[in-house]
Image (cartoon, rainbow, N blue to C red):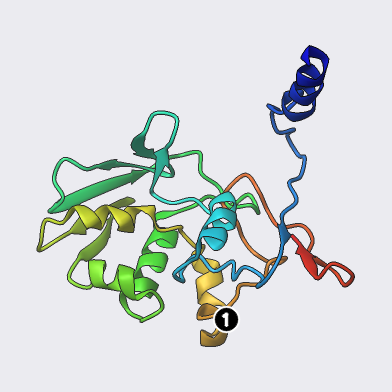
């Protein structure tokens, strides 16, 4: 009995905790619909899972500390009527260019002036969003804790938003040519005909 329990333990837990290798890769095998990879659209859980590896937002949630923390910006959340977000210095797109306040403004302008994401539109339709010398400000007419959802919106590069049409804006993003801000980029997409599985 002891030997069998030991074998089961070794099988399940030996080397189960591993650290990622820098410049290594992670493979996601997708059964069903291919993820849209569009951070502006409402997302299902598996879309969110993949998008969270590719894009950053102003704030993030630290599950180890169980608290909201900064991602690409430090935001003052003491007053939900008026929120100031100061972008960090060491934030970059996957092509090496800096993430700027223009990228943040372009993302929120698309969301505010279109029906691409009705949930976020409802939260920011009456919000004044401004770029004040690199500081992103949100002025609200209503104090609503749900507004914090807006600060978790993945940011998309202005250069990407300026160069895509409505069809792609409201649909799937091209995975290979994407400009990403998180530690991962999409390198290859393949399809296994025998298993009906797409590999990302």
The relative height of residue 132 versus residue 73 in the rendered view (above or below) is below
Image mark count: 1
Residue at (67, 70) in percent of width and height: 34
Residue labelled with disc 1:
168
Secondary element type, mark 1? helix
Rendering quarter of residue 73: top left
Instruction: Say whether residue 137 is visible.
Output: no
Residue situated furthest top in the rendering: 2
Residue at (77, 66) in percent of width and height: 198
Pick the front one: 130 or 26: 26
Q: Is 98 displayed left or right of 65 in the figure?
A: right
Residue at (41, 44) in percent of width and height: 60
Quadrant, the C terminus: bottom right
Rendering quarter of residue 154: bottom left
Point out residue 17 in the picture as x, y percentages from the top left corner: 68, 26
Instruction: Say whether residue 46 is visible.
Output: yes
Q: Is 180 displayed left or right of 130 in the figure?
A: right
Pick the front one: 183 or 27: 27
Pick the front one: 155 or 92: 155
């Amino acid at each position: 009995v002891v030997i069998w329990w030991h074998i089961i333990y070794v099988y399940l837990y030996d080397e189960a905790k591993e650290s990622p290798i820098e410049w290594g890769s992670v493979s996601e095998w997708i059964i069903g619909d291919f993820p849209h990879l569009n951070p502006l659209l409402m997302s299902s859980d598996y879309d969110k899972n993949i998008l969270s590896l590719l894009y950053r937002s102003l704030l993030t949630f630290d599950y180890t500390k169980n608290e909201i923390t900064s991602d690409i910006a430090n935001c003052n959340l003491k007053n939900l009527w008026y929120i100031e977000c100061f972008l960090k210095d060491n934030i970059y797109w996957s092509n090496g260019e800096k993430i700027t306040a223009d990228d943040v403004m372009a993302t929120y302008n698309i969301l505010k002036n279109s029906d691409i994401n009705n949930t976020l539109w409802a939260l920011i339709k009456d919000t004044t969003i401004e770029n004040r010398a690199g500081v992103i400000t949100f002025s609200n007419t209503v104090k609503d804790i749900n507004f914090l959802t807006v600060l978790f919106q993945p940011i998309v590069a202005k250069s990407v938003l300026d160069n895509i049409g409505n069809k792609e804006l409201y649909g799937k993003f091209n995975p290979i040519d994407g400009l990403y801000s998180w530690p991962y980029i999409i390198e290859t997409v393949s399809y296994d005909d025998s298993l009906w599985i797409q590999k990302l």
